[in-house]
């Protein structure tokens, strides 16, 4: 009994000793001296890095203590009160804690969204463009992308709001969302800025409330303009947002169609994007949704625009290319939807006929690939059977004898 008590006491003392650096770091963060705050934040980041798998529960304890860290970002005078280095450290801590839904919930409840929007506004309004300012703007954008994370797999019904989506909801409901969208046009000469900002809007577009809010603040045109940006991830994110808009909201779908998107979308079916699978597949989903979900009048007008942009020729050409099967299947689905619209049926048929030989060649290659994989699987199965038979017979039978027995139907596996 005494040994058990001693063991428990020793374990508690060990845990207390292990937790002392974290407690000391949090104590420093709460102080007024910049040096101590900076030291505390640096130590917390170091402790998180040392326990990346959270085996010691470091991240859980930091999340539980976020109340001590969030005021650095949520106070109304953060920019003037704290150095850029302190702000950057605090932003990185919030990012790391945002991997967990509980971390994002804490950030929402402690006013981090509003604080970050305020920092963004102050930095961009004053057109601060020093390297340090650009880095802070990048860090703020990355933090907004992290805290607004929404798991789309948990959004099954239109009104589903997964746990951990509280920051996304706060941003959606913010009266400053329109002004925040305008920041897509702000040029900080940084790819990271736009990548993170558009990732943030992707998060919002997973929620039904976000889709509706985008429509009310006239966001569609801003997202379509992003398709002209040279950064691949920005294009991917913009297409994901547009895909969610046209799939979930009829009014947003009409706004997209009024912007005459055929030529913009046609660009992403060209050979220069064949290696960018996500861009191509998002484009195909958008085309399919516009041809399937729009009104009859909208379908005809959009179909005619697609003819003018040579989209059907591009889609038919994709069927004969060496592209992933899923990409080619999506292209085929879009062509099938277009073929059902009487006014553009002939254009679809002509495109398929022009690419018939390449399509047939690709189908033969697919069939050969299926046969090859089937033969490989058969050989693998035979090998496993031979090994099992050898095991049953004590391992003294040669491979040649096993093959002969299997060919004759002998042994346990041939009966």
Image (spheres, rainbow, N blue to C red):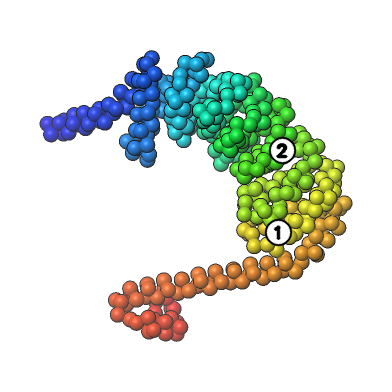
Taking the view exactly as shown, the residue that stands out farthest to the left is 2
Q: Name the residue under label 2.
A: 224
Question: In the image shown, does 168 or 394 lie closer to the viewer?
Answer: 168
Q: Which residue is drawn at 34% across and 76% down?
A: 390
Is residue 240 positioned above or below 361 on the image? above
Q: Which residue is drawn at 62% across and 51% down?
A: 276
Across and down, in percent, residue 260 comes to: 80, 41
Across and down, in percent, residue 406 comes to: 43, 81
Is residue 384 positioned above or below 205 on the image? below
| Quadrant of the snapshot with the N terminus | top left
Question: Image quadrant of residue 323?
Answer: bottom right
Q: Mark 2 falls on what kind of element?
A: helix
57 left or right of 210 in image: left
400 left or right of 322 in image: left
Across and down, in percent, residue 207 comes to: 62, 33
Is residue 238 positioned above or below 365 on the image? above
Is residue 33 positioned above or below 381 on the image? above
Q: Name the N-terminal-most of marks 1 and 2.
A: 2
Question: Image quadrant of residue 41?
Answer: top left
Question: Image quadrant of residue 187?
Answer: top right
Q: Mark 1 falls on what kind of element?
A: helix
218 left or right of 69 in image: right
Question: In the image shown, does 98 or 141 lie closer to the viewer?
Answer: 141
Q: Disc count in the image?
A: 2
Q: Which residue is drawn at 37% across and 40% down?
A: 53
Whether residue 101 is visible to the viewer of this picture, yes or no, is yes
Q: How far apart are marks 1 and 2 (CA)?
A: 24 Å
Judge the density around disc 1: few (<14), some (14-19), many (≥20) Cα neighbours within 10 Å: many
Q: Mark 1 points at which residue?
A: 318
Question: In the image shown, does 233 or 354 lie closer to the viewer?
Answer: 233
């Amino acid at each position: 009994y005494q040994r058990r008590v001693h063991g428990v006491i020793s374990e508690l003392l060990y845990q207390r000793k292990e937790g002392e650096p974290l407690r000391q770091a949090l104590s420093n963060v709460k102080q007024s001296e910049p040096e101590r705050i900076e030291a505390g934040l640096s130590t917390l980041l170091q402790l998180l890095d040392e326990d990346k798998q959270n085996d010691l529960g470091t991240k859980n304890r930091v999340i539980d203590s976020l109340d001590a860290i969030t005021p650095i970002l949520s106070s109304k005078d953060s920019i003037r009160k704290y150095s850029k280095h302190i702000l950057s450290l605090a932003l990185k801590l919030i990012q790391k804690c945002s991997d967990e839904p509980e971390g994002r919930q804490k950030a929402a409840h402690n006013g981090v969204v509003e604080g970050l929007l305020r920092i963004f506004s102050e930095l961009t309004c004053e057109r601060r463009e020093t390297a340090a300012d650009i880095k802070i703007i990048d860090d703020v954008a990355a933090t907004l992308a992290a805290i607004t994370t929404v798991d789309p797999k948990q959004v099954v019904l239109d009104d589903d709001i997964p746990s951990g989506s509280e920051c996304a909801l706060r941003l959606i409901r913010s009266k400053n969302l329109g002004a925040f969208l305008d920041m897509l046009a702000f040029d900080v000469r940084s790819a990271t800025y736009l990548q993170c900002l558009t990732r943030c809007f992707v998060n919002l577009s997973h929620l039904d409330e976000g889709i509706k809010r985008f429509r009310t603040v006239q966001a569609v045109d801003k997202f379509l303009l992003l398709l002209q940006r040279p950064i691949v991830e920005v294009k991917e994110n913009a297409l994901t947002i547009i895909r969610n808009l046209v799939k979930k909201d009829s009014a947003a779908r009409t706004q997209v169609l009024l912007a005459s998107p055929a030529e913009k979308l046609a660009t992403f079916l060209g050979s220069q994007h064949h290696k960018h699978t996500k861009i191509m597949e998002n484009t195909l989903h958008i085309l399919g949704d516009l041809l399937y979900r729009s009104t009859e009048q909208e379908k005809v007008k959009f179909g005619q625009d697609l003819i003018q942009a040579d989209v059907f020729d591009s889609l038919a050409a994709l069927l004969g290319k060496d592209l992933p099967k899923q990409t080619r299947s999506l292209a085929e689905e879009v062509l099938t939807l277009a073929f059902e619209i009487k006014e553009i049926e002939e254009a679809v048929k002509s495109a398929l006929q022009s690419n018939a030989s390449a399509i047939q060649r690709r189908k033969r290659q697919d069939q050969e690939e299926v046969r090859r994989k089937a033969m490989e699987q058969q050989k693998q199965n035979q090998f496993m059977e031979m090994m099992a038979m050898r095991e049953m017979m004590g391992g003294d039978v040669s491979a040649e004898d096993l093959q002969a027995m299997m060919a004759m139907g002998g042994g346990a596996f041939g009966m």
